[in-house]
Image (cartoon, helix red, strand yellow):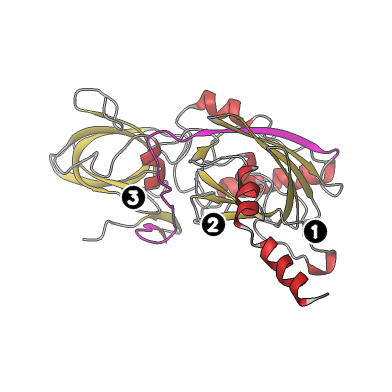
Amino acid sequence: MALWMLAVSVHAEHDSSARVRAFARLPDWSGLWEQYSSGATGSSDNPEEFKASMAPVHPPYNAEWEAKAQAAAKQRASEPDKVCGNIGFPGLMIGSALMFEVVITPELTVMHFDFSETRHIYTDGKPLPGDDDVFPTTWGWSAGHWEGQTLVVDTIGSGSPVTAFGDPISNQARYHERIRMVDHNTLEDRLTVNDPVALAHPWEIMRRYHRVPNMTRMVEEECGGNERDTRGNGTFTIAPASR
Amino acid sequence: MLALCCAPLAQAHHSQAMFDNGRLLTLNGTVKEFQFTNPHCYIQLLVADADGSTDEWSVELGAPAHLLRGGWKVKTLRPGDRITVVINPLRDGVKGGHYLSGTWADGKPLGPPP
């Protein structure tokens, strides 16, 4: 290729008007979003809203994994040890008290949740990594594309429980999402979970997220700072306030 | 079928097992300190005992992000405020528990200004 043709080609890729047009085609999902309202308890303060926003909540397990899930639930009920950890994907989308912000560029959509949990959804055309390049991570590996104003996402390789309650799923699960803005105050995620190892059939879930009231800035949660949950008396307790 | 019992705490990080979710305790007291901190906010509450002495209770709330979403502010509670709170107490008997609800002395709910 002649040098001048290469120069024109490079210039075209960085053409600011083309870049502006690429951004202009994208939706505006700016703001803070939540699945259900939260408050001083650290969780849902509205049982009816919580119940409506979370249905269905139980994965359609096959018999073997239903038994695993029941055993895991029993263990969690008596286990005081789990303090401060991530929720991960798909729990963040299926049922979580965390709020999030969405930053959209033509190449990448970032969903940032207030416990420093972040999803990276690449929309630059690169495919999902192959089996030899995937290991289970908390948020999995995502690739997406835009169909108009709807973000279509495929995710593999999540090592997290399928719900924020801690229900198990195999790390062979594959997730397909269609995320869109229903109206100015509502985002929607239609998620299908395919896991022939754990599920009797694909699990289809629809979740909606609403704008967070009372706040205009992201405020992070974190494990550090004033962590007073501590082991004592053979179990977990609250340490005295520091003087 | 697993029961849809409890909303997952933001933290997922936080097991509820340290609190007795089957018991409710009501505390009337005076705020000694309101800690607006991660990962939990705390109300240090001075509660008069039956024998006239005063005990200090540690009432654990959600993280600041959750209180802010619910309309609370950094200085919603100040030392000297008289309040009533309902908690699930700690299982180990230490004077503390998980906040469920609260009211001012006049009965109005704690949280966002009216």
What element does badge 3 sit on?
Answer: loop
Q: Provide residue A130's location: percent of width, then percent of height.
A: 83, 64
Image mark 3: chain: B
Alpha carbons under labels 1 and 2: distance apart: 30 Å
What residue does disc 1 label? A127
Chain letter belonging to callout 1: A
Q: What is the CA distance from the residue labelled 1 to the residue labelled 3?
A: 54 Å
Q: Which residue is mark 3?
A: B94
B112 left or right of A230 in image:
left
Mark nearest the camera among 1 and 3 is 1
Secondary structure beneath disc 1? loop
Same chain shared by disc 2 and disc 3? no
Residue A236's disc is none
The image shows residue A59, relative to residue A71, as above or below, that is: above
Which amino acid type is shown beneath numbered disc 3? Answer: Val
Q: Which residues are magenta?
A: A200-229
Which secondary structure lies at badge 2? loop
Task: Determine which residue is flagged by label 2.
Answer: A85
The vertical placement of A206 against A67, above or below, is above
Q: Nearer the viewer, mark 1 or mark 2?
A: 1
Residue B70, horizontal then vertical, whole percent: 38, 35
Which residue is at the front of the view, A53 or A242? Answer: A53
Q: Is residue A77 left or right of residue A196?
A: left
Kind of residue at disc 2: Gly
Quadrant for the N terminus of chain A in the image = bottom right
Amino acid type, mark 1: Pro
Residue at 77% from the left image edge and 65% from the top image edge: A134
